[in-house]
Image: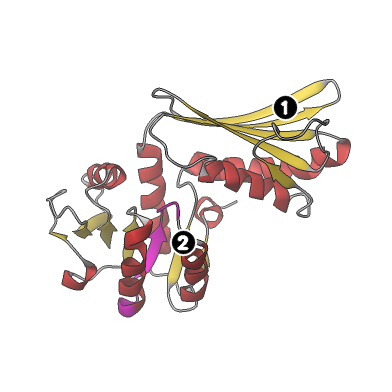
C-alpha cells in the first residue's frame, strides 16, 4: 500500500482527496498538514511539517504558495516524492522544483484532471497541423466568480502545449482593447470569463477558412482533480529522482 502525506488537507481539494482515499485499498493518507489543524479524516493533522513523525512514499501538495517551501524542505530532507498541485507559485518556486527534481521524484501540473492532460496532447497535435494551413487559434476559459487568477493555469498550459507543436511561434494576447488593428497572425487570444457558479470550462478554437474546429473540457466536480492527483501519486511513488508530468501518468 502506498503511504501519503496530504498538504492542505483541510482545504476544499484536501477534503475531496480524503474522501476519495477512504475506499481505496492501495492508497492511504498517513498524515495531513494544514494551518487550521482540524481533523480532516482518519489520520493525524499537523500544523507544520516539522511535527510529522509518520513515514510516507509520496506527498500531495494542494496547499498554497506560502506553504509550498516548507513542503519542499520536508520532501527533500526525507527523500519523499512530491506531487505538486498548488497553483499561483512564483517563478522562484517553479525554478526550485526544477532544482529539487535532481534529488527527489517531482511531478507538477497546472491541472490534475486526466481529461485535461489528454486534451493538452490533442491540441498540441492539432496545432502542429492546422497552424500551417492558416488556422487562427483562440482559447476561452470560464469559471465561477470566486476564482482569483485569470487567465487560469489550465488556459496557459493549453497555450504552451499549442506553442510546443508550433516551434514556439506564438505570443499570447490577453486584451486587444488598446489597439485598433486586425488580428495578428502569430498570436493566441486568451479570454477569461468569471461569473456565478460556472464550472471550470476550457475551449480551444481553431478557426480556418470556412471551417472551425473546437476542443472543449468541462469540469463538473473537483473529484476529477482529486482522482488525477491520486493517480499521479501512485505513479510517482517509488520512482527515482527526476521531473515527471501528467503526460507520463496517462501514457501520452
Label 2 Cα crowd, 10 Å radius (few <14 / some 14-19 / many 20+):
many
In the displayed structure, would residue 126 be above or below residue 89? above
In the displayed structure, would residue 209 be above or below residue 56? above
- Cα–Cα gap, marks 2 and 1: 31 Å
Magenta-tinted stretch = 77-88
Q: Residue 230 at x, y = what percent?
A: 36, 51
Please tell me in which quadrant of the rendered image residue 196 appears.
top left
Residue that label 2 marks: 107
Residue that label 1 marks: 213
Comes first in the chain, label 2 or label 1:
2
The scheme the figure's colours follow is: secondary structure
Q: Is residue 249 visible?
A: yes
The residue that appears at 20% across and 66% down in the rendered structure is 48
Label 1 Cα crowd, 10 Å radius (few <14 / some 14-19 / many 20+):
few
Please tell me in which quadrant of the rendered image residue 53 appears.
bottom left
Callout 2: SS? strand
The residue that appears at 44% across and 79% down in the rendered structure is 103
Callout 1: SS? strand
Along the line of sight, the residue nearer the viewer: 212 or 252: 212
The residue that appears at 60% across and 51% down in the rendered structure is 252
- Is residue 125 shown left or right of residue 244? right
Q: What residue occupies the far top of the structure in this picture?
A: 210
Which image quarter is the N terminus in?
Answer: bottom left
Q: Residue 199 at x, y = what percent?
A: 43, 28
Residue 169 in magenta stretch: no
- Is residue 50 shown left or right of residue 175? left
The residue that appears at 65% across and 45% down in the rendered structure is 159
Q: Is residue 1 visible?
A: no
The disc at residue 37 is none
Q: Are marks 2 and 1 in contact (CB under 8 Å)?
A: no
Amino acid at each position: 500500500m502506498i503511504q501519503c502525506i496530504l498538504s492542505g488537507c483541510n482545504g476544499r481539494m484536501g477534503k475531496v482527496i480524503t474522501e476519495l482515499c477512504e475506499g481505496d485499498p492501495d492508497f492511504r493518507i498517513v498524515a495531513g498538514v494544514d494551518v487550521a489543524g482540524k481533523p480532516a479524516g482518519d489520520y493525524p493533522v499537523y500544523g507544520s511539517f516539522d511535527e510529522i513523525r509518520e513515514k510516507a512514499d509520496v506527498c500531495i501538495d494542494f496547499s498554497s504558495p506560502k506553504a509550498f517551501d516548507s513542503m519542499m524542505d520536508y520532501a527533500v530532507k526525507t527523500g519523499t516524492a512530491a506531487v505538486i498541485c498548488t497553483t499561483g507559485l512564483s517563478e522562484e518556486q517553479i525554478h526550485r522544483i526544477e532544482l529539487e527534481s535532481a534529488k527527489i521524484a517531482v511531478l507538477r501540473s497546472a491541472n490534475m484532471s486526466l481529461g485535461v492532460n489528454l486534451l493538452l496532447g490533442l491540441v498540441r497535435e492539432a496545432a502542429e497541423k492546422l497552424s500551417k494551413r492558416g488556422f487562427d487559434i483562440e482559447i476561452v476559459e470560464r469559471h465561477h466568480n470566486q476564482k482569483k487568477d485569470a487567465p487560469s493555469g489550465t488556459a496557459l498550459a493549453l497555450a504552451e502545449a499549442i506553442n510546443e507543436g508550433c516551434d514556439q511561434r506564438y505570443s499570447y494576447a490577453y486584451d486587444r482593447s488598446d489597439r485598433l488593428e486586425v488580428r495578428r497572425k502569430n498570436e493566441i487570444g486568451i479570454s477569461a470569463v468569471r461569473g456565478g457558479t460556472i464550472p471550470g470550462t476550457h475551449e480551444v478554437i481553431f478557426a480556418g477558412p470556412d471551417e472551425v474546429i473546437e476542443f472543449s473540457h468541462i469540469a463538473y466536480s473537483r473529484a476529477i482533480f482529486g482522482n488525477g492527483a491520486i493517480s499521479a501519486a501512485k505513479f510517482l511513488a517509488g520512482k527515482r529522482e527526476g521531473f515527471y508530468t501528467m503526460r507520463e501518468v496517462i501514457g501520452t
